[in-house]
Image: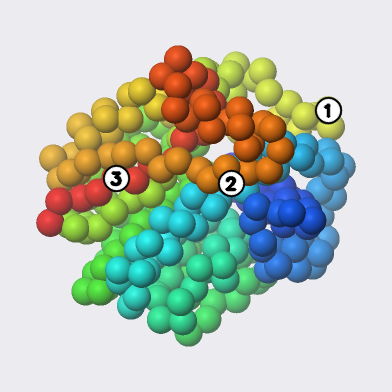
Amino acid sequence: MSGVPETLLWNLWHRAYEARQPRTVLPDPEAVALLDRIDYPFAETFGEPNALLAQGHALRVRTFDAAVRAFLAEHPDGTVVALAEGLETQFWRVDNGRARWLCVELPETAEVRTALLPDGERRRTLARSALDLSWRDEVDPRNGVLITAQGLLMYLQPDEVRELVAGCAEGFPGASLVFDAVPKWFSERTQSGGMATAQGYRPPPMPWGLDAGQLAAVRDFHPGIRDVRELLPPRGRGFYHGVLAPLTHRLPVLRNLRPTLTAVARFAE
């Protein structure tokens, strides 16, 4: 795998690393077991995980988990549509035993996912681009719908992001979309080739960036978007994730400097 699909291995590498920590912020035994089963040169490709980066990634994942759990508490028989979740193991962390789960993946990624995480009775994988909005026809909205786009939108062109979000709002009135974004400075840096590990791994360009201070602009993507608000991650362990990082979420002068933000867009019924 290469390009954007390869990032699913980077995510798994760091998530499993954090899950193995004694006081982990994200217990994820399924990710640890999955990593041990994959024959791939993780360390040679990505380098040894950076502890701060891995914990930050895990805290972002926990923010998504909390949003899904809140949805399932209100809609226990609802459907979660995970757009391009790669080798994410969220289903096993949040499953309530009743929810339906649809994973929409590019064909090459879907092949890998179904081989490593075979579909189940309530969980299936659809080999289709998230930008092909025909995936909406595969979703039964009667018991509620939550759409997640974790680590996806930043790799799309700005007009593609707008069309995808608008398509979700149009197709699922009353539903919500949980997504993450990188700030514009980070997006620009990835496009200028200024990011690489010591091993030479260079993450794919991220054409779409969104500053936290501009989050309200997402409402302009479609008239059906009722509101958009940021979801703050929980505090982590240590000085940076326990003290310093939370300050960047609350101080206006720092809010656009942090590397990612997670938000939820709610659609009018």
Cα separation between marks 2 and 3:
20 Å
Q: Farthest residue toward the bottom?
A: 121
Picture residue at 57% right of the left edge, 42% below the top: 235
| Cα separation between marks 3 and 1 | 37 Å
Q: Which residue is mark 1?
A: 198
Q: Left of 19 or right of it: where is 71?
A: left
Q: Is residue 267 above or below residue 136?
A: above
The amino acid sitting under disc 3 is: Ala
* Quarter of the picture holding the C terminus: bottom left
The spot of residue 222 in percent (x, y) is 18, 39
Three-letter code, disc 1: Ala
Position above or below: 82 against 52: below
The 10 Å Cα crowd at callout 2, few under 14, some 14 to 19, many 20 or more, is many
Where is residue 208? Give x, y as percent: 44, 29
Q: Nearer the viewer, residue 157 or 233?
A: 233
The reply to whether callout 1 and callout 2 are in contact (CB within 8 Å) is no
Residue 128 in the image: state x and y as whole percent.
43, 59
Residue on which disc 2 sits: 59
